Each structure stands twice: as structure tokens, then as C-alpha cells.
Image (cartoon, rainbow, N blue to C red):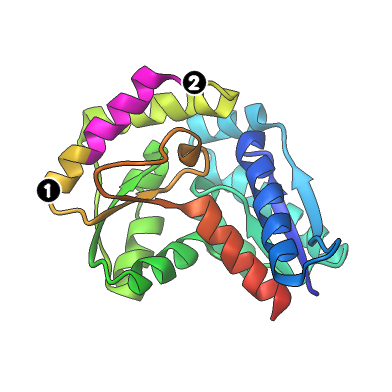
Amino acid sequence: MKTIGIIGGMSYESTVEYYKIINSEINKALGGLHSAKMLIESYDFALIEEKQSEEDWETLTQILIESAKKLEKAGADYIAIATNTMHLMADEVQANISVPVIHIAEAAANYINEKNYNTVALLGTKYTMTKPFYKDKLKNDFGINVIIPDFEGQETINNIIYNELCCGIIKKESQNKILNIIDNLKENGAQAVILGCTELPLIIKNASIEPIDTTKVHCIEIVKKLLN
């Protein structure tokens, strides 16, 4: 079995899910007392969010590069960034290490193509929804059309993620707001919705179109690599 190096803590709520799902899938595949060989570098998310709000992506890029190098040196065969937003600098991380980065958007795209969807909605932080790093990969590399909420919807989802989900707070009112946004995206042609924030599956389990749990599909892709 190979070893996965996870850059986590962004937020810890989703990193917990990565740990649970990867180990569960390894055990499901191998049985007995088997679990994953895993290294985790976990950050104080308050410091990361501060740099995000300042849009200091250069500093954040250096933080992730140093984490990836540390994990590689410690024996990781693959690197996984346990958050959608921070894949904004995944290409820079990959360029600075010699082991593969398992990209969350590629894992989502593989699932979308398996389901034969050609148009999907993308929900996540405002950075994930508006910056090109996620949408362009899906469109240019996989031929998948991506639509996002209007500005009001973007702000609503972003606030719920940072002020509630990252703090472990789940509100029925917030769930209903997101479900209404998904309904509007369905009317605009979305066949499925990417939960492009690793905290969103904590609040959205069902919707009027299929919700694609990026945490789960990323973890499944990681396990495939570890067992290959």
C-alpha cells in the first residue's frame, strides 16, 4: 500500500471526513484490521482564512508548497489538498514536488463523466465559484459546462461556509437557502451540482439534482491510487 500525505485543517471539519472515508474505503477493500497509511499536516484555519480574505495567494502558495515538500520528505507517495479552494495553487504545488498531487477537480470530473452529465452547477467559497482554476479545468480538460449562482447566491453560500459550516454549525434555515439556490441552477440547465467546498456535504445530502460530494469522490480517487 502507498502512503498519502494530506494537507488539512482547512477546515478541520472536512479533514475529519477525509480521515474517516479514506480509512473506511481501505478497510472495505482489504478487510480485517487494514487502514490507510497516512500523513497529515493540519493548519490553524484562522491563519489560512485571514490570508484568503486578504487574497494573499502568494503567501498561501508558499505555505502549501512547504507542506507538500515536508510530506514528501516524510514518505508520502501522493499529496492531497483536503479542500477545494486551496486547489487554486495546486499547479504550483505540483511544480515543486516530485510525487503526484491528486487533484480534487479531476476526481469530480471523472465522476461527472461517468454519469454522462455535460452541464453542472458549482457551489463553494466565493473564490472557488468565481476564480477560473476550477471551472476552466472542468471545461478545458474534460468538456464539462459549469454554471454558478448569481452574486447574491455566491455571498449567501460563502457566508454559510465560513461562519457556520467551518465552525461545525448546521442550520436548517441555511440548508433551505442552499437548496433554493440549487433549484434555480437546475432551472438554468444544471444536471447535477458539485459541492465544491469540502464542508458542504455536511449540510446538503439531498437536492433536486444530484449533489456531488467532492470530499467523497476525492477520497475514493485517493484510495484507488494507494491500492494501485
Question: Residue 118's image quarter?
Answer: bottom left
Picture layout, residue 100 above or below residue 199? below
Q: How many marks?
A: 2
Can you tell which mark lies on residue 163? 2
Q: Amino acid at mark 1?
A: Asn
Magenta stretch in the rendered image: 170-182
Can you tell which mark lies on residue 188? 1
Picture layout, residue 117 above or below residue 13? below
x and y, in percent, of residue 195 in the image: 40, 46
Between residue 113 and residue 144, name the one nearer to us: 113
Residue under the point 49% across and 66% down: 107
Which residue reaches farthest front? 32
Query: Is residue 177 a member of the stretch shown in magenta?
Result: yes
Mark 1 secondary-structure assignment? loop
Residue under the point 29% across and 67% down: 139
Q: CA distance from mark 1 to mark 2?
A: 28 Å
Callout 1–callout 2 Cβ contact below 8 Å: no
Mark with earlier residue (1, 2)? 2
Q: Is residue 31 left or right of residue 225?
A: right
Between residue 152 and residue 70, name the one nearer to us: 152
Q: Is residue 188 left or right of residue 83?
A: left
Between residue 71 and residue 189, name the one nearer to us: 189
